[in-house]
Structure formats: C-alpha cells, structure tokens
C-alpha cells in the first residue's frame, strides 16, 4: 500500500482536528446557565438565524422542543432539544438536515417523530410533512424523511395546523388566498385535499389557529380582522374586525376565548360569541407584539414575545374574575397591567415561544439570532 505524503498527511490531520474542534465547540455551546441572575438555560447549537420553535407534545415523559433555522445558504436544520429531568441542562437529541428556510414548524401532537414545515424554495413557498429518522452515528446531520408534500397551493402558504388535542386524520393549511382541509395518512404517505375555500381577491390570510375544543372551528388571521371558519361548511361564521393581528391562540382551558397579538393594541382577549368588544387588554410590548400563547395547564397565564427582544409573562382572569368572565357587566374593556415578569436576556427579536406540554411551568423562546432559552415560571404558578 502506498503511504500518504507528509504534506497530505498533515492536511488530513488538520482537517480532522478542525472537525473535532468544531464538534467540541458546538457541544460546549449546547447548554449553559445564563449569567446576570437569570434562571434561563441557553441552547446555543443553532448555527443560523431562526424564527420557529415548537413543543413536542407527543414526547411523553420529556420536555422537548423542535427548532428550525432560516438560512439563505440552504443548509438549514431542525434541532430536537430536550431538558434533562434535573431541570438545569439542555441536550441536543439530534439535528436533521432541511435544505430550505423554515418559516413555520409544528410537531405532530400524536407522533413525536412527525413534524410539518412551511419553507421557501427560491421564489416559491412549499409545505411538507416529515419523519425524524433514527439517529445514525455515521451522519452528524441526517436528512429528514419526507412523508407528504402539501403541493396543492398556488398562493404563498403561511401555516400548517394540526388539531392540538390528539390524533386526528385531518390537517389544515392556510395560504394567502385559501384554507385547505386535508385527509392525511402518514403511514401510507398519502395526503388528499377534501375541501377548500377562498378568502376572496381583496383579502389575504397570514396564519391562524385550530380550536382545541372544536375540531370543526379554525380562526384565520385576515388583513385587519380575525375570521372564524366552520370546516364542515367552509364558511366564515364570525369575525373580529378592525384589528391588525399578527398571532392568535385559543385558551385550552376555556371554550370560546382567544388571545390576539396586535400591532396597535398589544394583546387582547376575546370571547368569540360576543366579538364586538374585547374582554381585556394588555399593554403588549414596546415594539411589535409578535406572538402570544396561553399556558396549557395554568389558567390565566399568558406568554407574549416581540421585536423588543423581550418575553413577557402575564396573569389574567384567575380566581373569582374567571367565573364572571362572560357576564354582561364585564363586557367593557378593562385596562390592566398584570405583568408578572419580563425576560430580557436577549439581543434580537423573538418570533417563537412554546410552552412545554409535559411540564407547563416551563417554556422555551427563540430569538432571531438562533438562541433558544428555556425558563421555569414555578415561582408564579398557583394551580386552581
């Protein structure tokens, strides 16, 4: 066998040591306590900018999240990260190659190995359902397995919605012009559109949420309104008008109640049965309020995040107030500021937040610079 030349041997050794150094530095960045008195734990394993983070609801017994990157280099990844039972360390269970920029990321609520993404490919948008492969020591970044491509859209797709409360054979997708309902069979890699409706030429959808209390109800964000759609008839049944909404989230503990993140008003809570006037208003953020999330277990706890590099924890509608939430005398707007805490250890806009379904006292936030921070809110929790 012919041996390597000394020069080639040195180059080979150099590449090896550089690769090893890169792995070690990435591992060191994965989990570290934040400084400055914060209780948050930082995951620094994302190499690129990012906007999307999702709770892995189906990962029973673990606090797990998925995070997806947004790089023009077409070297994007989905990271599966997990909080260890000790509660003071995050580990990366695996990261998986996803070529295109990720603009929307959801974990399947009944199968921890399945996820959906909305992504850009050149000038076009696409959406797919993927399966996380078995981890292979031969590959540092294995390719996600594409189960289904949701390719019936002709307009720019904005969001994929799974019914959040468990196994369901339907999926909802929203593009700028239409709402689609799909019949999904992931095991056989089949997706079929069973109904579709347009918002009309004068309007645009930008996202939405699926009602956890009703499989047939979806709230869709449309220009300066929030539209409520019945998936059986594919008709708009109700609307909240004159609201420039960026995000909407249903209250998982109380039917008909939603929270909206809005440009002008910050955060508002609504009863969809009486949608002319909001139930409550919260000040929101000093810049755009981008995302809002109800806690899955603790009634009245709400997270919000925005482009002011801050995550806010709010307490609204607990105790005796809750029982009178729907009474006529409470229909007036209540200007309150029940801010429990502001988390400010960020240097960039925050577009993604997610509560843990396994431990609802824990949430993860993702800033645009690709930093994930996991926080505990146990000092503020009081079970009803």
Image: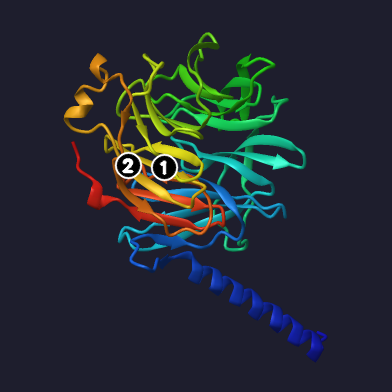
Whether label 1 touches label 2, CB < 8 Å:
yes
Residue matched to label 2: 314
Residue 302 place in picture, x, y as percent? 35, 39
Residue 227 place in picture, x, y as percent? 51, 18
Query: Can the viewer see residue 306?
Result: yes
Residue matched to label 1: 304
Where residue 46 sits, quadrant-wise, is bottom right
Q: Earlier in the sequence, mark 1 or mark 2?
A: 1
Mark 2, Cα crowd under 10 Å, few <14 / some 14-19 / many 20+, is many
Q: Is residue 354 above or below residue 19?
A: above
User: What residue do we see at 50% from left, 45% from top?
Assistant: 287
The residue lying toward the viewer, choosing from 15 and 220, is 220
Mark 1, Cα crowd under 10 Å, few <14 / some 14-19 / many 20+, is many
The span from disc 1 to disc 2 (Cα, nearest Å) is 8 Å
Where is the N terminus found, in terms of image quarters? Answer: bottom right
Where is the C terminus found, in terms of image quarters? Answer: top left
Q: Which mark is residue 86?
A: none
């Amino acid at each position: 066998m012919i041996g390597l030349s000394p020069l080639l041997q040195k180059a080979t050794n150099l590449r090896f040591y550089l690769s090893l150094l890169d792995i070690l530095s990435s591992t060191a960045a994965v989990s570290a306590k934040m400084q400055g008195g914060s209780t948050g734990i930082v995951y620094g394993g994302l190499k690129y900018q990012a906007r999307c983070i999702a709770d892995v609801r189906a990962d029973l017994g673990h606090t797990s999240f998925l995070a997806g990157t947004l790089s023009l280099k077409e070297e994007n990844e989905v990271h599966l990260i997990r909080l260890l039972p000790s509660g003071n360390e995050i580990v990366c269970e695996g990261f998986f190659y996803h070529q295109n920029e990720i603009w929307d990321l959801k974990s399947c609520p009944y199968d921890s190995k399945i996820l959906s993404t909305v992504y850009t490919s050149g000038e076009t948008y696409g959406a797919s359902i993927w399966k996380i492969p078995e981890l292979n020591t031969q590959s540092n970044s294995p390719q996600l397995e594409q189960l289904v491509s949701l390719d019936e859209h002709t307009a720019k797709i904005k969001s994929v919605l799974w019914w959040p409360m468990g196994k369901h054979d339907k999926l909802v997708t929203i593009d700028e012009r239409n709402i689609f309902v799909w019949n999904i069979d992931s095991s056989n890699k089949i997706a079929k559109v069973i109904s579709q409706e347009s918002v009309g030429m004068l309007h645009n959808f930008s996202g939405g949420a699926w009602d956890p209390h009703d499989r047939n109800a979806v709230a869709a964000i449309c220009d300066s309104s929030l539209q409520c759609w019945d998936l059986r008839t594919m008709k708009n049944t109700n609307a909240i008008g004159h609201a420039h909404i960026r995000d909407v989230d249903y209250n998982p503990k109380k039917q008909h109640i939603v929270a909206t993140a809005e440009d002008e008003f910050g955060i508002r809570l609504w009863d969809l049965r009486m949608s002319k006037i909001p139930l409550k208003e919260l000040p929101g953020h000093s810049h755009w309020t981008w995302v809002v999330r109800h806690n899955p277990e603790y009634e009245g706890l709400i997270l919000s995040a925005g482009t002011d590099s801050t995550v806010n924890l709010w307490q609204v509608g607990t105790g005796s107030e809750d029982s009178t939430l729907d009474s006529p005398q409470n229909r007036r707007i209540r200007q309150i500021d029940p801010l429990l805490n502001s988390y400010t250890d960020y240097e960039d806009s925050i577009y993604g937040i997610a509560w843990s379904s396994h431990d609802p006292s824990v949430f993860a936030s993702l800033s645009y610079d690709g930093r994930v921070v996991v926080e505990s809110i146990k000092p503020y929790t009081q079970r009803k």
